[in-house]
Amino acid sequence: MNRLDLEDLALRAGWSPTVVMHPDIERDLQAGKELLGCYHIEPEDLFLICSNSGGNAAIVEVAQQVKQRGHTLLAVTSLAHTHQSPARHPSGKKLYELADLVIDNQAPFGDALLALPDGSTACAISSVTGALIAQMLTAGIIALLLEQGLEAPVYLSANVPGGMERNNRLVQYYADRIRPV
């Protein structure tokens, strides 16, 4: 697994850090067009895109490129939120419409659970459910690998004996594919 991040446009594609760190980067169509160019992608790679709203231009553009390249796309999104918010991509599409499999994170519209006295809300849930879903997928993938008699190439905690050494071996083996630890 390798994390793709819009911040990599600054680290790997020469974009200005000021532009990349701006909150509107997720709505920048050009950012979506250039992101996949930052990585070594193999034909058999599968993509998991997490976006609570699923409607921002950069995310939808990445999803379109993933599908145009013939990859499988899994989406983690809030169907409640995406059905109530506008599509911001010129195609009018949203993430869930491009995915081969959609996992609904069950977050409410606005992604907040706590109603405040002034009518606003706080306490986002999509980050919590996203982490849980990611760990559940990881556990399932590891189980499938082990059932096939294959090693699960996973990082260990750097705070257990042999953890750093194992992680360094994985980084060396997958040097052109993953970020260093």
Image (cartoon, rainbow, N blue to C red):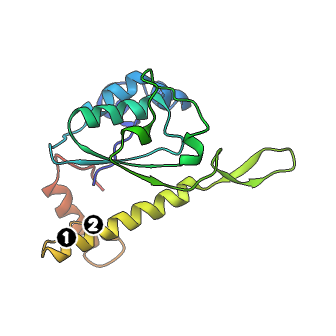
Left or right: residue 150 compared with residue 111? left
Label 1 close to label 2 by CB (< 8 Å)? yes
Question: Which residue was labeled with disc 1?
Answer: 145
Q: Residue furthest right?
A: 117
| Residue appearing at x 57%, y 30% in the figure | 86
| Picture coordinates of residue 38, whole percent (x, y) | 26, 34
**Left or right: 31, with 168 as reference point:** right
Name the quadrant of the C terminus: bottom left
Seen at 24% across and 32% down, the residue is: 68
User: Whole-percent x and y of residue 165?
Assistant: 22, 69
Q: Residue 153's mark?
A: none
Residue that appears at 49% across and 39% down: 54
Mark 1 is surrounded, within 10 Å at the Cα level, by few (under 14), some (14 to 19) or many (20 or more) other residues, namely some
State the CA–CA distance, disc 1 to disc 2.
6 Å
Q: Name the residue rendered at 53%, 47% in the picture.
A: 79
Numbered disc 2: secondary structure: helix
As drawn, is 77 to the left or to the right of 99? right
- The one of 128 and 6 positioned closer to us in this rendering: 128
Residue 141 shows which numbered tag?
2
Relative to residue 170, is residue 52 depicted above or below?
Answer: above
Query: In the picture provided, is 42 more to the left or to the right than 98?
Result: left
In what element is the residue under mark 1? helix
10 Å neighbourhood of mark 2: few (<14), some, or many (≥20)?
few
Tell me which corner region of the image, top left, top right, bottom left or bottom right, holds residue 37: top left
Residue 34: x and y in percent read 31, 26
Q: Amino acid at mark 2?
A: Ile
Residue 77 % position (x, y): 49, 48
